[in-house]
Amino acid sequence: MALVRLLARPLLAAPFVFGGFNQLRNSEQFAPAAEPVTNRLAAPMKLPTSDPNVLVKANGAAMVAGGLLLATGKAPRVSSALLSGLLIPTTLAGQAFWATDNEADKRRHLVGFVTNLGLLGGLLTSAVDTAGKPGLTYRAGMAKDAVGRAAHTGALEARLAAANAQNKLPL
């Protein structure tokens, strides 16, 4: 594993592990801010509950798990995608700078919102990082080319065999 990945993954995962534990320990503190978002997401996503306290705890547990997986390099692409999906509603609930009239709170939430956008960018980069190996698109293209070459070679061989049969030339 490259040194950069060895260092970057735990650094990128740290806010999620810390924030996830914080949500687990203090879910009742985060639940009121999360309620508008959980109410909008619970029904369309067919969640088993719309209780914001329970959903904050579930989000926190998922963040801890995803953060630990990313930090240790186990399933880094999957954990990055998971954390990306968790970060969006967390940001909408916790950094709603548009919903406050207090200028100091508005600035604080705006800084948190922009910081979370940066984290989202890092997670998206991590989600598509193949660690130097060819990605799925490249491998699919190579497989398609290999099938095409094999079909073309087979067609040429068939035409050569037919021409040889007409001229009765030995192969």
Image (spheres, rainbow, N blue to C red):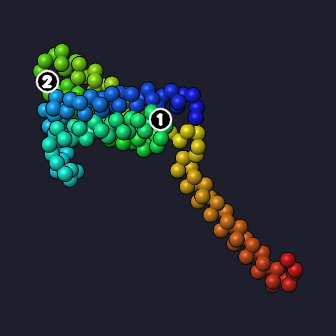
Image quadrant in which the N terminus is located: top right
User: Which comes sooner in the sequence, label 2 or label 1?
Assistant: 1
Secondary structure state at the residue bearing disc 1: helix
Q: Nearer the viewer, residue 115 or 69?
A: 69
Q: Position of residue 9 (x, y in %)?
A: 46, 31
Q: Nearer the viewer, residue 111 or 25?
A: 25
Q: Position of residue 43 (x, y in %)?
A: 16, 50
Q: Which residue is mark 2?
A: 100
The quadrant in which residue 104 appears is top left
Say which of marks 2 and 1 sits in front. 1
Q: Is residue 144 left or right of residue 114?
A: right
Q: CA distance from mark 2 to mark 1?
A: 38 Å
Q: Residues within 10 Å of mark 2 (few under 14, many from 20)?
A: few
**Residue depicted at 56% across the width and 49% down the height:** 138
Q: Which residue is mark 1?
A: 72
**Residue depicted at 32% across the width and 40% down the height:** 62
**Residue depicted at 45% across the width and 33% down the height:** 71
The three-letter code of the residue at mark 2 reads Thr
Q: Is residue 61 left or right of residue 147?
A: left
Secondary structure state at the residue bearing disc 2: loop
Query: Can you see residue 125?
Result: no
The relative height of residue 104 versus residue 73 in the rendered view (above or below) is above
The three-letter code of the residue at mark 1 reads Thr
Q: Nearer the viewer, residue 123 or 59?
A: 59
Residue furthest to the right in view is 170
**Residue depicted at 23% across the width and 30% down the height:** 25
